[in-house]
Each structure stands twice: as structure tokens, then as C-alpha cells.
Image (cartoon, rainbow, N blue to C red):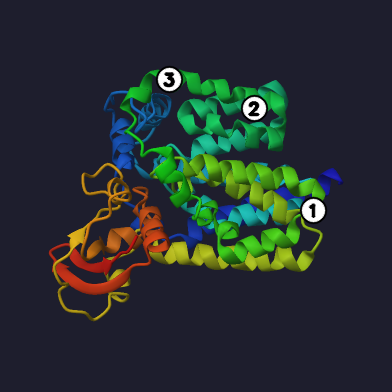
């Protein structure tokens, strides 16, 4: 491909990715919630105790950024820029269909959302994808830096090798920098319990991981794209081993699927994939730190629920559904969903809610009026 055309295509990808992230997302709704609040504290000068919840290298970088500016929006700006870089670098990974691949990445709902959060997600992913695009030992160094800021990326080395070659995959050793932090990681649900549940959720791979998206993937698969399909499957299987698996763990799979579908010889598939990605991103935009009124409009008109045994979606909670799957309580078992479960925030409760809806076929049986807003109570069955 001629250099001028390549530059023009990558420039267009950068423009679209920037526009979607900065003009389409209602960034004014953003709140430094959950672990983002820790990074905001680092930005404001606090020294955090090293932990997998706030990686020391990134926290240190944010602290340095805070010496240059006092505006918290700078945290969003660097992550939004990382999201744009991911789209551009990902486009270069496609052997054909570079523009289509880049636009799919620019429009990917999960990539767009995590670009607008100051968590250790967008920046480590950008380092990994750029590393794969650069290739060789320089690519390995970039991947190592990404893995040092998000340890589970090391487990995705086979998928990185598919994109950038085995030398880049060697960068997985960068995760050793975070080895001392593993004692701060939460206890995990046994693999035999978590894996069968989470494998049902390819949706975490983004728009192309949803049922309709997978049809487009199937229409795009050719012999030469089988390694990309295998890489995506690896990302999904590895992520499924974690009880709190969510979109943040599957972003590299969203990249591999975009490269696969963007390289499709069937242009109608690419066109439909772009439209579907845009629609899915529109849904994220609607629920991005959604106000109470957005959730209130979906609450059914039901009385207070009957007595029931409640299970929780938090894997660390004593009443977590993970703890009772092998000894399901008798009688009516229920789960409550509030606005925060539907809103896309960096706390990731939207991913837990999807798991509850997908796995337990919830049926609404009542609504509780709480000071923080309504809580829809569902009956769930094993």
C-alpha cells in the first residue's frame, strides 16, 4: 500500500476515534469512582501503598502528571489519547482492510468506554497493541511495560504473539515487576465453578462478541484468520478463569476480532460490523455514568417483593452467588439490581449484572424504594 494512502487512512482512524471518545461520550458525567478515586488521589499527591488495585508505576506517572497540572481532566485526557493510539496501532496489524479495522476499533464500545477511565486498563492495552504493531524486541519492551501495569496481560502472551510475533510475547516477563503485589489480590472462585459460568459471556469481547457480532465473525473466518480466532478464544478462556471477569479483561480479544472482521473479503460484513459497533457504542453512551432518570424509566411497576433469600453479584461478598452455586438455597432466591448495575462505570458492576442476567434468567418480582433510588428485585434460579 502506498505510504500516502496509509497515512491518510490512519489519520482518518485517529480523527474518528477522537471524535467518538471526546464528542460522543458524555464525559461531563464521569466520576472518579472506585479504584479511579485512588488514582485521583495519587494525581493529587498522595502516596499509595502498592497494590494490584492501583499499580505503582501508573500511580507514580499520575503523580508526576499532577505536578504539571491540577486539572483532574488531565487523567481522562491521557487515557483518551491511549484509546486513540490503540485504534491507530491496531489498524496497522491488519494485513488487509486497514481502514476498516481501524474504524472498528475506533467504534468498539468496550474500547471506547475504557478509554474514558483513569484505571490501569487503557494505557497498558495501548502499550501492548503498539508493541505488537512495532514488533521485535522494541515491541517486547513496550509489552513488558504494559504487563507491568496490568499483570494479567502476561497470561495473554499467546494472543500477543499472534498479533506481533513471538519476540513481542517475551515481554510478558514485565509482569514480574508486579509479582510482589499478588498478595494483595482477592481470593478467586475455584476454576471448576467460575469457568463454565463465564464461558457463556463472549459479550465481554465487545460488539463482535455478542450473538449478532459472532455471526459476522463466522462470516469472516478463513483459513488465514484462524490464528486470530484462536487468539480471541484464548483471551476469552483466560478471562473466564476469573470470577470477576468483565470487559476490561477482554479488550485484547476485541482487538483481535476487529482485525479478523476488518480484514474480511466480504465488504457487506464489514459494513454491518461497523453499523453494529456504532449501535452498541450508542448503548454505552446512553448508560455512561447514567443519571437516575435513565434507570428509573426501565423500572417495572411492581409492589415490594415477597420474602426471599438474596444473593449478591460481588464475588468478595459473604452472600455472593459464587458461594452458593453448589449448594443452592431452598425457597425463593433473589438478586437486586440498582442504577449502578446498569450504568457503565469503572467499578464494572455492569459486567456483573450481565453475568447475573445471562446465567440465572432473572424474573422481576418486586421493587424496593431506597434512599439511593429504586432497587429491582429478581427471582433467580440455578
Residue 169 bears which disc, if any?
2
Residue visible at 43% across and 22% down?
178
**91 shown above or below 201:** above
Identify the residue at horizontal 33%, vertical 27% (top origin): 51
Q: Residue drawn 33% across and 23% down?
A: 183
Q: Position of residue 58 (x, y in %)?
A: 42, 29
Residue 288 or residue 214, whichever sits in front: 214
Residue assigned mark 1 = 222
Contact flag, marks 1 and 2 (Cβ < 8 Å): no
Q: Secondary structure at mark 3?
A: helix
Asked if residue 11 shows in the view, the reply is no
Please tell me which of labels 3 and 2 falls first in the chain: 2
Q: Quadrant of residue 70?
A: top left
On-image quarter of the C terminus:
bottom left
Residue that badge 3 annotates = 179
| Sequence order check, earlier mark of 1 and 3 | 3
Amino acid at each position: 500500500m502506498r505510504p500516502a494512502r496509509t497515512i491518510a487512512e490512519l489519520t482518518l482512524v485517529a480523527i474518528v476515534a477522537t471524535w467518538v471518545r471526546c464528542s460522543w461520550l458524555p464525559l461531563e458525567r464521569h466520576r472518579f469512582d472506585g479504584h479511579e478515586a485512588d488514582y485521583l488521589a495519587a494525581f493529587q499527591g498522595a502516596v499509595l501503598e502498592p497494590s494490584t488495585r492501583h499499580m505503582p508505576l501508573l500511580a507514580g506517572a499520575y503523580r508526576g502528571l499532577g505536578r504539571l497540572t491540577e486539572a483532574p481532566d488531565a487523567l481522562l485526557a491521557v487515557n483518551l489519547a491511549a484509546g486513540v493510539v490503540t485504534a491507530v496501532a491496531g489498524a496497522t496489524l491488519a494485513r488487509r482492510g486497514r481502514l476498516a479495522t481501524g474504524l472498528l476499533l475506533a467504534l468498539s464500545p468496550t474500547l471506547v468506554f475504557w478509554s474514558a477511565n483513569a484505571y490501569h486498563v487503557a494505557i497498558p492495552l495501548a502499550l501492548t497493541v503498539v508493541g505488537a504493531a512495532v514488533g521485535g524486541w522494541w515491541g517486547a519492551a513496550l509489552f513488558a511495560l504494559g504487563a507491568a501495569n496490568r499483570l494479567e496481560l502476561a497470561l495473554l502472551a499467546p494472543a500477543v504473539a499472534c498479533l506481533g510475533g513471538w519476540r513481542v510475547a517475551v515481554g510478558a516477563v514485565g509482569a514480574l515487576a508486579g509479582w510482589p503485589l499478588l498478595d494483595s489480590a482477592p481470593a478467586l472462585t475455584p476454576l471448576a465453578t467460575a469457568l463454565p459460568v463465564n464461558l457463556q459471556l463472549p459479550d465481554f469481547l465487545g460488539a463482535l462478541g455478542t450473538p449478532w457480532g459472532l455471526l459476522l465473525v463466522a462470516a469472516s473466518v478463513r483459513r488465514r484468520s484462524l490464528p486470530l480466532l484462536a487468539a480471541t478464544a484464548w483471551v476469552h478462556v483466560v478471562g473466564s478463569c476469573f470470577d470477576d471477569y468483565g470487559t476490561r479483561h477482554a479488550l485484547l480479544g476485541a482487538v483481535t476480532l476487529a482485525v479478523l472482521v476488518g480484514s474480511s473479503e466480504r465488504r457487506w460484513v464489514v459494513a454491518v460490523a461497523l453499523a453494529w459497533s456504532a449501535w452498541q457504542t450508542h448503548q454505552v453512551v446512553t448508560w455512561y455514568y447514567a443519571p437516575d432518570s435513565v434507570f428509573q424509566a426501565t423500572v417495572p411497576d411492581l409492589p415490594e417483593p415477597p420474602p426471599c433469600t438474596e444473593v449478591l453479584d460481588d464475588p468478595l461478598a459473604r452472600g455472593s452467588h459464587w458461594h452458593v452455586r453448589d449448594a443452592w438455597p431452598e425457597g425463593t432466591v433473589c438478586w437486586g439490581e440498582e442504577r449502578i448495575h446498569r450504568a457503565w462505570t469503572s467499578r464494572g458492576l455492569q459486567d456483573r449484572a450481565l453475568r447475573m442476567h445471562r446465567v440465572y434468567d432473572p424474573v422481576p418480582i418486586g421493587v424496593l424504594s431506597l434512599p439511593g433510588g429504586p432497587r429491582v428485585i429478581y427471582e433467580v434460579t440455578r
